[in-house]
Image: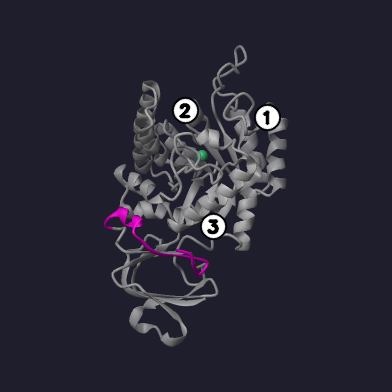
């Protein structure tokens, strides 16, 4: 496809100010030319012209934390254990919903039975309408903690084996989950978090040695302490991060992927589905905690990449705009929230050919009917989505 997005306000994702009256030419999936609309030399009769007037063009959005195997909603954990055919079919639908909301690249950071690996591969072939997906395969967690459908280990050797097994299965990154003991699973005298500093160091070493990035789930105070200092590539959630943790993350170049949508959605369901008081209280506390952590992370200069945790918590798919709005509510400039969702996310994921609108890069683009630099809610008014130069929404 050969197209010209004509006479548009261009925000290229690099952090430079938006430029008015620009045109972007796309051919064979790549950005071929960028310049002032009046300077374009081609023949309008031979290209598909997309009207960009009073619109803003931004790089395709990246969601660094999704789970396409679950739809989210009030019973999200149970949905991960639905029959495999149902999970597989649903994952295709949810990935498409995500794409239509402007997400052209997504990291699927945990799915039962490697569903996400197959989904990512199928997306790559172009057989389904889906974002470019980077899959973590199955979560890796210590036995007796976290969810029953994670890949579980007890000792360091087993942990190394688990990581190698995931790599052999074809993952794009490794996802580990630090968590406390499940009810009744805690052995006598065991520490709060059995996936401790030493074991996490083993995981980081094993993943990095093989050339893979490692994402670490941490959503309790002790796990946040451990994960922030471990040199993981990204810390997911992180509602209990404190000043010393944030300083360590800044030093280690560890990204924070805050997933605030989850607590926002939890609070909604707590009221809508009438959860017990204790669960409502927890939803409120986590929401407050995440807001405080993000505000402090911004001040501390920690790199932030956007992730919704759609499917992995109560948050549903296709609502990336909400996460960006929450970031702005926590004190981020709209521009920085957009960077978290584009070039910063691309650096975390390792997508050198995506994340900015630059000549030669892959043409993943979102056209908006309003200006997100003025009002981040403009991410909700999508005029068009292009993935690899093809219009997909
Ligand atoms: Zn998650």
Residue drawn at the location 42% of the way across and 43% of the way down = 302
Nearest to the eye among marks 1 and 3: give it.
3
Classify mark 1 as within 8 Å of ligand 1 or not, answering yes or no.
Answer: no
Residue drawn at the location 34% of the way across and 42% of the way down = 299
Q: Earlier in the sequence, mark 1 or mark 3?
A: 3
Given residues 55 and 391, the one toward you in this image is 391
Which quadrant is home to the C terminus?
bottom left
User: Residue 207: x, y in percent?
Assistant: 65, 43
Q: How far apart are marks 2 and 3 (CA)?
A: 33 Å
- Give the number of the disc on residue 229: none
Q: Which of marks 2 and 3 is nearer the N terminus?
A: 3
Q: Residues within 10 Å of mark 3 (few under 14, many from 20)?
A: many
Given residues 322 and 243, the one toward you in this image is 322
Residue drawn at the location 58% of the way across and 52% of the way down = 134
Q: In terms of secondary structure, where does tag 3 sit?
A: loop
Q: Name the residue under label 3.
A: 130
Q: Name the residue under label 2.
A: 220
User: Residue 233: x, y in percent?
Assistant: 54, 44
**Magenta-colored span:** 374-393
Classify mark 3 as within 8 Å of ligand 1 or not, answering yes or no.
Answer: no
Q: Distance between the residues labelled 2 and 1?
A: 20 Å
Seen in the picture, residue 90 relative to 184 is either above or below; the reply is below
Does residue 187 appear in the picture of this structure? yes
Does residue 212 appear in the picture of this structure? no
- Give the number of the disc on residue 153: 1
User: Residue 62: x, y in percent?
Assistant: 47, 54
Q: Name the outermost residue toward the top.
A: 188
Q: In terms of secondary structure, where does tag 1 sit?
A: strand
């Amino acid at each position: 496809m050969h197209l010209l997005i004509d006479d548009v306000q261009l925000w290229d994702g690099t952090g430079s100010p938006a430029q008015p009256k620009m045109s972007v030419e796309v051919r064979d999936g790549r950005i071929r030319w960028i310049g002032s609309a009046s300077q374009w030399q081609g023949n309008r009769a031979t290209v598909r012209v997309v009207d960009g007037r009073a619109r803003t063009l931004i790089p395709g959005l990246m969601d660094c934390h999704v789970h396409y195997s679950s739809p989210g909603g009030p019973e999200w954990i149970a949905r991960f254990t639905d029959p495999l055919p149902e999970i597989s079919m649903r994952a295709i639908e949810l990935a498409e919903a995500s794409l239509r909301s402007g997400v052209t690249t997504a990291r699927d950071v945990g799915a039962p039975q490697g569903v996400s690996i197959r989904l990512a591969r199928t997306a790559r072939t172009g057989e389904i309408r889906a974002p470019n997906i980077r899959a973590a395969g199955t979560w890796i967690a210590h036995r007796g903690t976290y969810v029953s459908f994670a890949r579980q280990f007890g000792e360091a050797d087993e942990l190394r084996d688990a990581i190698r097994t995931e790599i052999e299965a074809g993952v794009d990154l490794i996802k580990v989950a630090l968590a406390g003991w499940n009810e009744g699973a805690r052995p006598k005298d065991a520490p709060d978090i059995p996936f401790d500093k030493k074991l996490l160091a083993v995981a980081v070493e094993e993943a990095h040695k093989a050339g893979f990035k490692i994402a670490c789930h941490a959503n309790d105070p002790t796990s946040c302490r451990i994960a922030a200092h471990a040199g993981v590539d990204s810390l997911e959630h992180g509602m209990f991060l404190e000043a010393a943790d944030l300083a360590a993350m800044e030093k280690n170049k560890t990204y924070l992927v805050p997933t605030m949508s989850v607590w926002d959605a939890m609070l909604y369901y707590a009221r809508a589905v009438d959860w017990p008081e204790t669960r409502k209280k927890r939803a409120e506390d986590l929401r407050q905690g995440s807001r405080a952590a993000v505000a402090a992370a911004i001040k501390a200069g920690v790199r932030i990449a956007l992730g919704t945790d759609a499917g992995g918590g109560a948050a549903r798919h296709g609502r990336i705009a909400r996460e960006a709005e929450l970031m702005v509510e926590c004190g981020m400039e709209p521009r920085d929230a957009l960077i978290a969702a584009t070039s910063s996310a691309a650096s975390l994921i390792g997508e050198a050919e995506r994340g900015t609108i630059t000549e030669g890069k892959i043409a993943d683009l979102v056209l908006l009917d309003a200006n997100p630099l003025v009002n981040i809610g403009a991410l909700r008014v999508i005029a068009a989505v292009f993935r690899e130069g093809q219009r997909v929404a």
